[in-house]
Image (cartoon, rainbow, N blue to C red):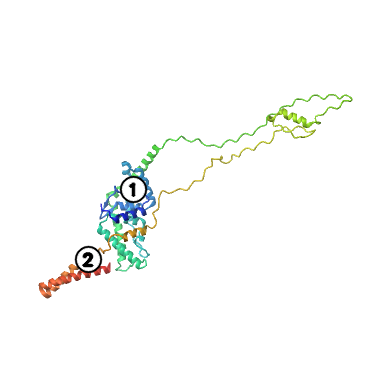
């Protein structure tokens, strides 16, 4: 495993903040199950790229929490997500070239979020020599983009065009190498079955852990109260017969002479239960003993008070989108790390020195013999070294 440096810490923080909505602790535990080949591929970098997608990140977080500390579920999860990684690697290994006709602020702006996350993680597992080369070329490209207003030189001898093509070729080559591994083949073969089995096991465990809840009685609207019916009115006692008036006696009062009093007596006899009412007439009026007005029945056409269903609230997504500004954060970590030394200078300069020494020694031998050969080799070697260095700096 490569030694962690401050560059590793910066790149890990950049990848975690910009790409992963899943819990970094869960991702770190899962990373221990993945495999990296320093010179060919890094399964952890493929996972970092997949987790740059909010939906996949949320799904991974849910699986990792459910399978935590459970070896059986962890094994199913590993196969399931290897299937996801294999599918991603196969698709990305055929990604088309970058559009060179557009303008870009830097290399990171040319990449997708998945490519940025992949590159940040892949830098941690590649050899220090290859990492320094990549950093140098990206710095060179960014400096040229800033000087040319974001345009990429597309001339025949353009180094910028070759940098873009070379980095993209290596990205596709890495993912194709992973897609061809037995690990990816197992994921393609068994990933869907493992996903279904994992989902079924989690559902069964959730069902067994949930307490049994008796079915709730069906709610029904309250019945409307029956209208009140008036009690039967009691029959008043018959009036005594009117005596025959005698000569000189005052006539007996007829029923209409004191009607109000009679009504009052009748109401008192019927009582409040009879619903009798007195109209207050004086003489000649019959007592009004019908039922008084009753209260209207309550309205039960709508839902009962206090049981109305409330409007559903907004649905919250479990996925957290990547943090903004990932391009600048990633490129800042690259700009402030690694070496600025041209990786092509070392071997090429010494090759030029060797060629110059051979040619100088040959010419010197023809002119001055062995002494001339020694002098010619020294002069030719120095000229070849510095000349090749200047040429490389001019081209690259």
Give the quarter of the image for residue 242: top right
Location of residue 178 in the rendering, given as x and y in whole percent from the top left corner = 29, 53
Classify mark 2: helix, strand or loop. Answer: helix
Which sits earlier in the primary sequence, circle 2 or circle 1?
1
Structural distance between the alpha carbons of marks 2 and 1: 45 Å
Q: Residue at x 27, y 68 (%)?
A: 395
Q: Residue at x 27, y 58 (%)?
A: 131
Location of residue 185 in the rendering, given as x and y in whole percent from the top left corner = 29, 49
Residue 26 lies left or right of residue 233; in this view the side is left
Image height check: is 45 above or below 342?
A: above
Q: Residue at x 69, y 30 (%)?
A: 272
Q: Nearer the viewer, residue 357 or 279?
A: 279
Q: Foreground mark, 2 or 1?
A: 1
Classify mark 1: helix, strand or loop. Answer: helix
Location of residue 252 in the rendering, given as x and y in whole percent from the top left corner = 84, 27
Q: Which residue is mark 2?
A: 348
């Amino acid at each position: 495993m490569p030694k962690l440096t401050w560059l590793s810490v910066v790149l890990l923080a950049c990848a975690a903040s910009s790409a992963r909505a899943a819990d970094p602790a869960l991702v770190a535990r899962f990373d221990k199950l993945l495999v990296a080949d320093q010179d060919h591929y890094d399964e952890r970098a493929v996972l970092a790229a997949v987790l740059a997608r909010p939906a996949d990140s949320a799904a991974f977080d849910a699986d990792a929490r459910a399978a935590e500390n459970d070896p059986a579920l962890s094994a199913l999860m590993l196969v399931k997500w290897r299937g996801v990684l294999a599918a991603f690697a196969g698709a990305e290994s055929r990604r088309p070239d970058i559009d060179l006709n557009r303008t870009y602020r830097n290399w990171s702006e040319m990449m997708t979020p998945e490519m940025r996350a992949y590159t940040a993680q892949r830098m941690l597992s590649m050899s220090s020599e290859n990492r320094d080369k990549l950093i140098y070329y990206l710095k060179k490209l960014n400096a040229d983009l800033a000087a040319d207003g974001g345009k990429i030189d597309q001339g025949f001898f353009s180094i910028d065009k070759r940098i873009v093509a070379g980095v993209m070729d290596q990205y596709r080559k890495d993912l194709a190498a992973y897609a061809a591994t037995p690990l990816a083949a197992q994921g393609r073969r068994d990933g869907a079955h493992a996903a279904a089995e994992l989902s079924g096991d989690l559902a069964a465990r959730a069902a067994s852990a949930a307490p049994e809840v008796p079915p709730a009685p069906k709610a029904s609207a309250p019945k409307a109260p029956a209208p009140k019916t008036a009690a039967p009115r009691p029959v008043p006692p018959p009036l005594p017969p009117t005596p025959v008036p005698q000569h000189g006696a005052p006539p007996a009062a007829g029923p209409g002479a004191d009607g109000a009093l009679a009504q009052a007596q009748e109401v008192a006899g019927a009582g409040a239960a009879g619903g009798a009412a007195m109209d207050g007439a004086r003489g000649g009026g019959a007592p009004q003993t019908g039922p008084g007005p009753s209260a209207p029945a309550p309205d039960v056409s709508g839902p009962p008070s206090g049981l109305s269903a409330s409007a559903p609230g907004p649905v919250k997504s479990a996925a957290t989108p990547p943090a903004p500004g990932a391009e600048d954060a990633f490129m800042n970590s690259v700009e402030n790390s690694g070496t600025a030394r041209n990786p092509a200078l070392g071997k090429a300069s010494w090759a030029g020195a060797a060629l110059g020494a051979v040619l100088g020694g040959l010419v010197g031998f023809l002119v001055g013999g062995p002494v001339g050969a020694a002098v010619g080799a020294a002069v030719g070697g120095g000229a070849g070294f510095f000349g090749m260095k200047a040429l490389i700096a001019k081209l690259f």
